[in-house]
Amino acid sequence: ANPFCRDMDWTGSQFSPNLDGQNNLIVSIYGSLTFIADMTKTFNGRFYFEATTTGHTITLAGKQYYNHIFFQGVGGVWTLLDEFTVNAQIIFLNGTLNTNNQVVNCNGFSSNIGTARTLSLGSSKISVTGVWSLTSTNLTFNAGTSSIVFDPNGTLNALGSDSLTYHDVIFLDSLYTS
């Protein structure tokens, strides 16, 4: 069976714990997620953030995801507290996601659904190596002073999002060096 919990909080854990498990599992989190720097994460299954209430946070403490991450709790509100790296897609279906001025790295970001949702980017720098795809239907989009940076293979797919206003969108060419 796929595991689930309200909050997954590793704060105070001793002896360098490891989050492990079969990579075909789906972990459903109905609250907040807090990793710690001293832990390892060899589990690379999918995480589904399913909260239907406000006030939830995500702290990765330098850990990365290697599978899709879903935000799909109707009424759920999540705030990133540190750098958020997903070497796959972030799929935003419901609720409110506040990147909270944090760096976000992802292969892609998808929110192509007509459900009510809010995306607040603040001053985040979001690096995308694949497709950024939003539909504006029922989306409250707060670009703030954010920058969305596409590597040479990145694509902005503006499906019905002619009413969205971005702050900075940057497309890098293959000659770019940082």
Image (spheres, rainbow, N blue to C red):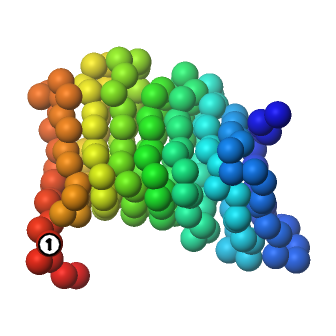
Please name the amino acid that badge 1 sits on.
Answer: Ser
**Residue at 22%, 58% in the rendered image:** 153
2 and 121: which one is in front?
2
Q: Is residue 9 left or right of residue 108?
A: right
**Residue at 12%, 28% in the rendered image:** 162
Q: Is residue 118 left or right of residue 74?
A: left
Residue 162 in view in this figure? yes
**Which residue is farthest bottom?**
178
Q: Position of residue 173 (x, y in %)?
A: 11, 68
Number of numbered discs: 1
115, above or below 68, in the image: above
Q: Is residue 132 left or right of residue 16?
A: left
Residue of label 1? 174
Residue 174 figure quarter? bottom left
**Residue at 36%, 32% in the rendered image:** 111
Residue 104 in view in this figure? no
- Tell me the quadrant of the picture where the C terminus can be found: bottom left
Q: Secondary structure at mark 1?
A: loop
Is the residue marked by circle 1 packed among few (<14), some (14-19), or many (20+) residues within 10 Å? Answer: few
Q: Position of residue 175 (x, y in %)?
A: 11, 77
Residue 149 figure quarter? bottom left
Q: Position of residue 62 (x, y in %)?
A: 57, 70
Q: Position of residue 97 (x, y in %)?
A: 45, 40
